[in-house]
Amino acid sequence: MSDIDVVIEARRTPGPLLGALDIGGTKIAGGVVDPQGNLLYQVQWPTPARGSSLEMLEAVYRVIDLLAQHPLWPSVRAVGIGSAGPVNTEGGTVSPVNIPSWRCFPLRTEVAAHSAVRDLPVVLGGDAVAMTAAEHWRGAARPYRNALCLVVSTGVGAGLVIDGRLHTGPSGNAGHLGHMSIDFAGRPCPCGSRGCLEGLASGTAIARTAAEAGWQPTGGDASATGVAAAALAGDPVALYAFDRAAQALAAGIAATAALVEIEAAVIGGGVARSGEILFAPLRQHLASYATLPFTTGTVLVPAQLGTDAGLVGAAALARHALSSSARLLGT
């Protein structure tokens, strides 16, 4: 697409629009999203996860700078941020487990101070909550009034939809299923607890379980992706590692269903892309854990939005600010 085409596209795009930032341990993504949830433009920058807090902020500002250069940016009327957590939405701070230099870092204030964002509403949420907002707005959770949405990747994150609305809790961390203790005598977790779901069901945990059980990667890929490929080929140790993860996920989903009566559990993230290698044992184990009459109907649904979920979800977090901002700015 030529520069002229981009300008024409921007002129034809209905405004006002939403800006979005998705901050993770590997990359920082930015995007522009329309009021219907369509991702119109996106950029990304590597996360200097082991760098200083200033280096991290400079990377975030670099992404905002790239967004601000696009012809669509002047139509943006609110900005949403989905960040690795924990987060504190009341204080606007983040303390991502995988970004050591950010502890109680005032991310919302720092983003709002950028010249391209100044005077715009800025809304902060956790990355899993953002994924939940995206799937409820545009994806697999849309048909359900009560749902649990999980991101099963390097870690395990989750969010809740209750009575048709995103339920974030006072600090924005409601539904933090990855740090529910499933194995009371299990491994210590970086969060300070032990036996957490994340330590049993994440991609990192799957690779560790396989290695501890004696699995040897044939192609040099010792990650969960390599384990998934081996499981697909019928390797019994790799299949065991996925079964173990599925059992832990099923226990967490069943516990959530018993607590808040969810209709569906939407599963996304890199591990979920392994398909039936995960979903087949997950359905089997969920049937054995979700046995109460009001939990037996809980369905498992693959997420629909894939890698777009983080940005669409960040925009979804800012949606409520869009109409008031648009009125104030006369757009």
Image (cartoon, rainbow, N blue to C red):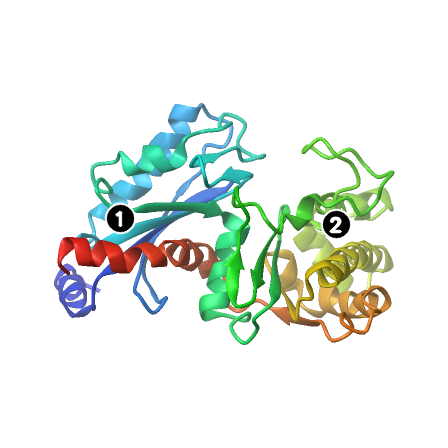
Judge by depth and name the residue closer to the eye, 278 or 168: 168
User: Label 2 amino acid?
Assistant: Ile
Pair 1/2: label in front? 1
**Label 1 is placed on what type of residue?**
Leu
| Label annotation for residue 277 | none
Residue corresponding to mark 1: 67
Q: Position of residue 294 (x, y in %)?
A: 76, 72
**Residue 105 placement (x, y as % from top left):** 45, 29
User: Badge 1: few (under 14), some or many (20 or more) residues near its Cα, within 10 Å?
Assistant: many
Residue 221 appears anywhere in the view: no
Relative to residue 51, is residue 189 depicted above or below? below
Q: Quadrant of residue 266?
A: bottom right
Find numbered disc 1 in the image and state the secondary structure of the residue it sits on: helix
Q: Work out whether 300 lies above or below 195.
A: below
Residue 258, by quadrant, is bottom right
**Residue 44: percent from the left, percent from the top?**
38, 47
Q: Position of residue 217 (x, y in %)?
A: 75, 49
> In the picture, which quadrant includes the C terminus?
bottom left
* Secondary-structure class at tag 2: helix
Give me the residue at 52% from left, 68% from top: 164
When asked about the image quadrant of residue 90, the answer is: top left
Quadrant where the N terminus is found in the figure: bottom left
The residue where tag 2 is placed is 206
Dots 1, 2 in contact, CB < 8 A: no
Front residue of 241 and 189: 189
Question: Residue at left 79%, top 54%?
Answer: 248
Labels 1 and 2: the sequence-earlier one:
1
- Crowd around label 2: few <14 · some 14–19 · many ≥20 (10 Å): many
- Marks 1 and 2, how far apart at CA: 36 Å
**Drawn side of residue 91 relative to residue 34, left or right:** right
Indicate left or right for 98 with 282 as reference. Answer: left
